[in-house]
Amino acid sequence: MKNVKNGKLTALSQTLRRNMTHEERHLWYDFLKSQPVTFKRQKVIGNYIVDFFCAEARLVIELDGSQHYNDAGKAADMVRDQYLKDNGLTVLRYSNLEIAENFAGVCTEIRNHIGRCT
């Protein structure tokens, strides 16, 4: 995985951290922040900013709003996910609706994945 500094993406990632969505805040403050492994928010990886990243588990977690469900969004996500997979990362995607309606199930799935990888 390339670790090249990208000033524009770094500035954008800082802005995104300050302005997390409701679902991102919920997952971060109510689950990820308390895990035994370190997660980073809005992490720059290559030419992308991922919602959450755990280096130890080689895990990316993406929370998807409505823009991810149109044809352009789906196509962009496929390219992005392939790039991340080609760099040895696992991508777990959850819709905002899943966070709202099945938070415990999402947390269990993430916890299980972390347990298998660490």
Image (cartoon, rainbow, N blue to C red):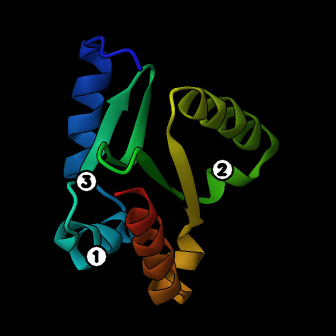
Using a 10 Å C-alpha cutoff, classify the residue at mark 3 as few (fewer than 14 neighbours), some (14 to 19) or many (20 or more). many
**What residue lies at 45% left-to-right and 69% top-to-bottom?**
110
Answer whether labels 1 and 2 touch (C-beta < 8 Å). Answer: no
From the image, tell me which residue sits under label 1: 31
Q: Quadrant of residue 72?
A: top right
Quick one: quadrant of the N terminus?
top left
Q: Earlier in the sequence, mark 1 or mark 3?
A: 1
51 vs 109, nearest the viewer: 109
Instruction: Residue 9 in the image: state x and y as whole percent.
Output: 32, 23
From the image, tell me which residue sits under label 2: 68
What amino acid type should be assigned to the residue bearing mark 2?
His
Instruction: Residue 65 in the image: state x and y as whole percent.
Output: 57, 59
Q: Earlier in the sequence, mark 3 or mark 2?
A: 3
Q: In the image, which disc is placed on residue 39?
A: 3
1 vs 10, nearest the viewer: 1
**What residue lies at 36% left-to-right and 64% top-to-bottom?**
24
